[in-house]
Image: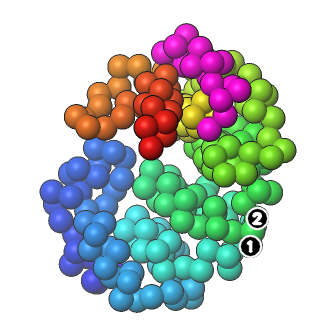
Amino acid sequence: MAELAELEDPKAREVNERHGDDHGVNLSHLRALAKRLKTQQELAYRLWETDDTAAKLLAILICRPKAFKRDELDGMLRESRTPKVHDWLVNYVVKKNPHAEELRPAWSADPDPVVASAGWALTTERVAKRPEGLDLEGLLDVIEAEMKDAPQRLQWAMNHCLAQIGIEHAEHRSRALDIGERLEVLKDYPTSPGCTSPFAPIWINEMVRRRDAE
């Protein structure tokens, strides 16, 4: 904890807080610390229990993702109220855990939109890598009905799923594009030069174009 405190940078905190993250540690420095510590499950538990955002991020980097029980992951997700902790937990831990598929539908149906967004993130992973058994038409039905008015974090996760369906599954592409055009979610989102817009129709068309050009 003392070492994390020494890594605190006021400028980094200012940038992070604009994104809802209450820590001031440069993430490349945090990764370097994690690399030095290597995997330490017990230390990861202790860091997580501090309820400090930087400590939780470090815990995620040094834990053993497959070691967590289902209920532990569910509790950890509900304690992950800052975006970076939430994203890292889902991407670096839950996706590598054997309980991910069991948690996916349970989280997707959760009344807490932040928890539900994690379920959608896991669904997006399956859309891209293991779509067998997924009802893609049903997912598009839910996105069409609910994405426009969903809270921000959930809306982002649904939008990512919509884009991924359009990118990966040509038979559903026209409907995915149509939903994106009609709902106009993230249509005016500011995008840096050289980056792809998160607006689903632009995102889908650009990724398909790149794939076709390879």
Q: Dividing the image into 4 quarters, which one contains the N terminus? A: bottom left
Q: Nearer the viewer, residue 114 or 138?
A: 138
- Colouring method of the image: rainbow
Give neighbour class at mark 2: few <14, some 14-19, many 20+ (Cα, 10 Å): some
Q: Is residue 44 left or right of residue 210?
A: right
C-alpha span from label 2 to label 1? 8 Å
Name the amino acid, label 2: His
Span colored in magenta: 168-184
Q: Is residue 54 left or right of residue 51?
A: left
Name which residue lies at 34% across and 56% down.
22
Cβ atoms under marks 2 and 1 closer than 8 Å? yes
Q: Is residue 23 above or below residue 5?
A: above
Q: Is residue 178 above or below residue 53?
A: above
> Which residue sits furthest right?
133
Q: Is residue 167 above or below residue 31?
A: above
Residue 167 visible (yes or no) = yes
Q: Circle 2 is placed at which residue position? A: 99
Provide the major secondary structure of the magenta segment.
Answer: helix
Name the amino acid, label 1: Lys
Residue 66 is situated, as x and y percent measured from the top left of the image, at: 67, 76
Mark toward the start of the polypeptide (2 vs 1): 1
Residue 180 is situated, as x and y percent measured from the top left of the image, at: 54, 19
Residue 154 visible (yes or no) = no
Snapshot quadrant of residue 123: top right
Q: Circle 1 is placed at which residue position? A: 69
Name which residue lies at 35% across and 19% down.
188
Q: Nearer the viewer, residue 68 or 79?
A: 68
> Which residue sits furthest top?
182
Q: Nearer the viewer, mark 2 or mark 1?
A: 2
Residue 106 is situated, as x and y percent measured from the top left of the image, at: 78, 48
Q: Dividing the image into 4 quarters, which one contains the C terminus? A: top left
Snapshot quadrant of residue 64: bottom right
